Amino acid sequence: MEFVIIFLALILCYAFLRTIFSIFRHTKPNNLPPGPTPLPIIGNLHLLGDQPHQSLAKLAKIHGPVMILKLGQITTLVISSATAAKEVLKNQDVNFASRHVPDALTAHNHSQNSVVFLPVGNRWRTHRKILNLTIFSVNSLDANQHIISQKVKALVAYCQKASQSGDSVDIGRAAFRTSMNILSNTMFSKDLADPYEDSGKDFKEVVRNIMVESGKPNLVDFFPVLRKFDPQGIRKRMTQYFGMIYDIFEVLIKERVKMGTFERDDMLDKCLKISQEKPDEFDHLAIKDMFLDGCLPRYVRLVQERQLVDRGDHCWDVQDLFVAGTDSTSNSLEWAMTEVLRNPHTLAKVKEELEEVIGKENIVQESDLSKLPYLCCVVKETLRIHPPFPFLIPRKIETAVNLNGYTVPKDTQVLVNVWAIGRDPNMWEDSLEFKPERFLASTLDLRGKDFELIPFGAGRRLCPGLPLANHVLHVMLGSLLNNFDWNLDYETQPDQTIDMKEKFGIALQKAEPLCVIPVPLK
């Protein structure tokens, strides 16, 4: 109710301002892409509903795969086909490489130092190179195999304990903790999801507060004229929380510098070495901003009618950590387990492959993946039908461009609806069915080359966390399926069916968490 009252009051203010300044408006370009007729002031916001990815996919069937809308004051281009996505993300990647920055991310000037939001240029290339060299390179992944294996073994041990007591496991929550600790050990050589360590508690609390703020629809994102006033106080509170998390990073940096040597060879050590060699290009603030890119959610959304739901005491399960490395992994694992358990044929086939290749009750290793083609197909099919980020991270064009014969105005926000592309019946046979077999004879991969399947994006803005996130997802899924059978929890699924409803938020998650009981193998 409070939001509605504020919204109505601000609409009146905006209408007044719009009238006063209408004389200064630029002439609208001709030959715009097709789209629904916007209403005064709110534009097409009323058409989004609580599932914008689905609503925009339906609108695209009417107006076409290149469609333009008005979301408040923000002109928004929606791309809904693989062909159009290729034009935007490959053929005209330079024109579409900038980012649309949510107002919350301007807190503490984070967006000005973030590799996610920096404009493409020398500074962005430097930060991206450092990120790739320190955590996402092939060499780094190879060097950190022992961390991945250790944390996945801990996940299996947790499930074994639940199996002995007959308790259910919240798959998303357990996978989140595992992914979080894999990456926090890669970065800091310590667990940040450990509820018993003070640093873990502090980190969790700060992220919890950030998740609450980031889950709120922010009027400023749709009506930039209100930016100066920050009417909901979101940027003010985010500035406070960002400051708190910078303080946590500062403690970690000072502790490591005080040691005098860099023997752990984790991401923090590597960044500090680079900082010593190039202090003008990469200072401690840049290190903290890079960690913030790594440790906090992508604040990517169109509009959200309600706040994110706290899953018990684990509110920060809800979204993406470590730039598509942590919660995109836990969300994807939850969807993969859901689909496999709903499809007995798939479950039997993947378990048979695992038993033949690595033997029952063993942990999947990176070296096993090339010998597990069906497991890889299950992951691809999961990411096709349940992409972690249905719109990727919104882009923005700095100058007017021509796209498929249409004129797209300057400052247009660009959304690539990969959820719609993955379910396009013109591209995929039985597009709504979960069929991993479709990839057995296919050369399509996830690395941004095949625009029918781009859950991690494409072009120069391809997610740098793709190799790690994809690797961890395969290893966790294979290990859980190879070590247990799984039964539904009667308390959470009394009718023994799995709820498949989606909840749109910072990332696309199950509306109801998957809670299943691990059963020892016979």
Image (tube, grey):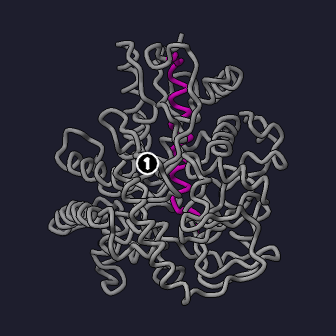
Q: Main secondary structure of the magenta part?
A: helix
Q: Position of residue 44 (x, y in %)?
A: 61, 60
What residue sits 49% from the left and 28% below the top?
514
Left or right side of 249 for 350: right
Which contiguous range is marked in magenta? 461-488
Residue 483 seen: yes
Q: Kindly identify the residue that appears in the image at 62 percent across and 64 percent down.
A: 39
Q: Residues within 10 Å of mark 1 (few under 14, many from 20)?
A: many
* Location of residue 169 (image quadrant): top left
Give how far across and how far down residue 473 sits, in percent. Answer: 53, 42
Locate residue 354 relative to residue 274 in the image: left or right. Answer: right
Counting from the top left corner in percent of width and height, residue 8 is at 42, 60
Q: Element type at marker 1?
A: loop
- Quadrant location of residue 381? top right
Q: Mark 1 = which residue? A: 319
Which of the 4 image quadrants contains residue 248?
A: bottom left
Vertical position of residue 200 compared to residue 458: above or below: above
Q: In this rendered view, identify the residue nearer to me: 153 or 349.
A: 349
Is residue 468 magenta-colored?
yes
Whether residue 445 is visible to the viewer of this picture, yes or no, is no
From this view, report whether residue 344 is shown above or below residue 395.
above
The C terminus, quarter of image: top right
- Nearest the camera: 218 or 83? 218
Report the amino acid beneath label 1.
Answer: Gln
